[in-house]
Image (cartoon, helix red, strand yellow):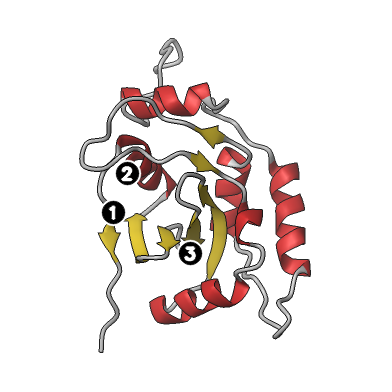
Amino acid sequence: MHADRTSSTRFSVPVDAALRAAGWLPGRWDIRQAEVWADALRDHASPAGHRHAVFPAAVEAWAEFGGLYINPTGTGRQIAPATLHIDPLHGLHLARTLGDLGRALGTEVSPLGAETDTHSLLAIDAEGRIYTLDHTGDWYLGPDIDHALTTLIAGVEPQRLTTQA
């Protein structure tokens, strides 16, 4: 029984501090906003007819972290910490790009948000794995949102995705 615990052990202290400064608290859950985003993505089609995938892992990530502007302070471990905005509409017009990534990975991929300093797109797949896409390539951030946020906020260098020939 740890009901009296005042701090979260889910994240390291600096990551927890950055998330709390952005307005996150353990138990945060805005399913109403997540459904608004889900509907907006489902209703959007590119001019060529590409559509967004919407699935439970994405909706859950949006419900817990959606709307947060995360601005870490301090230096990163390997690279600069990322400034983030968790809002899937950053990827609204990238349905084809996300569909292509999903086909390459053998899963569905949905937008999650953006690294606001670099305009990199954050994406989540149906299994909850997190990626970032930028002008230099596609990067793997972790097996779930917790690992990805830690990677981004702590300034850990992500892993480049490679495709098998």
Local secondary structure at mark 2: helix
54 above or below 78? below
- For badge 1, the amino acid type reads Pro
- For badge 3, the amino acid type reads Asp
> Where is mark 2, residue-wise?
151
| Residue at mark 2 to residue at mark 1: CA–CA distance | 7 Å
Q: Position of residue 66 (x, y in %)?
A: 61, 42
Circle nearer the viewer, 1 or 3: 1
CB within 8 Å, label 2 to label 1: yes
Q: Which mark is residue 125?
A: 3
Mark 2 residue crowding within 10 angstroms, few (<14) / some (14–19) / many (20+): many
Local secondary structure at mark 3: strand
Mark 1 residue crowding within 10 angstroms, few (<14) / some (14–19) / many (20+): some
Residue at x-position 54% and y-position 27%:
22
60 above or below 17? below
31 above or below 139? above
